[in-house]
Image (cartoon, rainbow, N blue to C red):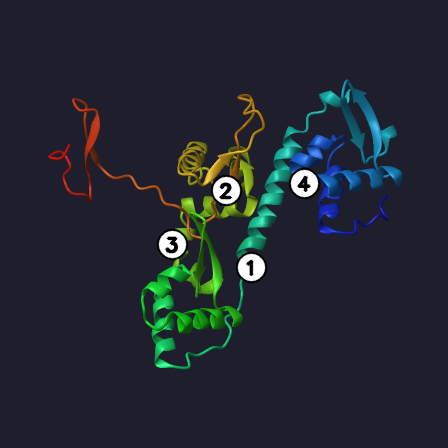
Amino acid sequence: MSDYVPSGKYEQEIWQFIQSRQVFTHADVEAFCAAGDWKRTNYLRSLARLNLVMLYQRKGNIRYYTAQDPASLSGDAALIDTSAMDAQWRSDRLGSKISAFQDRAQPLQPWTPQSPEEQKLWGFVRRQLRFTRDLVLAQKIAPDNKTTLFLRSLENAGLLRSAGYDNGKPYYTAFSTLEIMSRAKDKRLSTEGRIWTAMRAANKFTVEDMLMTFAGLEEDFSEKGIRSYCSTLEKAGYLKDSRRGRTSAQSVRYHLVRDTGPLPPTIKRLPVVVDPNEGRVVYVQGEEVTWATS
């Protein structure tokens, strides 16, 4: 077994996972590894054909397999507690994803505007942290065809990058990843910013995954705070509960369905005045008084 080397990244992840525990089921591999159904099933079958994975026990409809020497195992497979290993695996995977995500950066390519119109267009897009093509066209800095060619030239030079989607519309930025991180350093290093980065890296996660990721930093990343942030983002449409059947006994497994970019959605807590006689909010700080209107 020690001489076996998996062929691809998905195979490597599955192989590392099944070797990290005494027994596993196909459902465990599906829950903890990123490979799709076809690749996962065929890879596990190939391991079985190579005698690298063997059936350990069968309990009803559940089959427990092992990548260890079956002679070294004993006892009821269903009673083996894997909760600590599961939590550690998720934490390690999430940590590696965050590191890879934060290290990803594209170098700025040499490019200079060739005309006064391009200089104005370049100045405009560099003043926007992110923008849509329609927003640039709406400025009427140059004819539409020239504006389109300008944006295309930025894209060809590697200076126009995706900055997420909002309501189905693609957004772009003319800043490099490092520039964005520098401009948004305070936001990204805030509690919400670091949780948001972890969410983007994981894509699917539980609150428990986040707690493991920020273990030892409970003063800044309390369970109550993480749950509150996740709950609010779910209500705002950024997160979705991906549990099958919505079993109440299971921890909520969130899926990030609205990734709008590197900066964290910020929860604002503004003073409001609520009139219980009318059952409505009559004033929000920063807005004009609304009580006089029905």
Instruction: Label 2: state its secondary structure.
Output: loop
Question: Of tags 3 and 1, which is closer to the observer?
Answer: 1
The residue that disc 1 covers is 104
Q: Quadrant of the C terminus?
A: top left
Residue 112 occupies quadrant: bottom left
Indicate which disc, 1 or 4, sits on the residue closer to the N terminus. 4
Looking at the picture, which amino acid does disc 3 mark? Asp
Q: Is residue 212 visible?
A: no
Indicate which disc, 2 or 3, sits on the residue closer to the N terminus. 3
**Is residue 41 rendered to the left or right of residue 207?**
right
- On residue 257, which mark appears? 2
At a point 39% along the width and 52% down the height, the residue shown is 187
**Between 58 and 100, the one nearer to me in the picture:** 58
Q: Are marks 3 and 1 in contact (CB under 8 Å)?
A: no
Question: Of tags 2 and 3, which is closer to the observer?
Answer: 2
- On residue 186, which mark appears? 3
Question: Of tags 2 and 4, which is closer to the observer?
Answer: 2
The residue that disc 4 covers is 33
Around disc 4, counting alpha carbons within 10 Å, would you say few (fewer than 14), some (14 to 19), or many (20 or more)? some
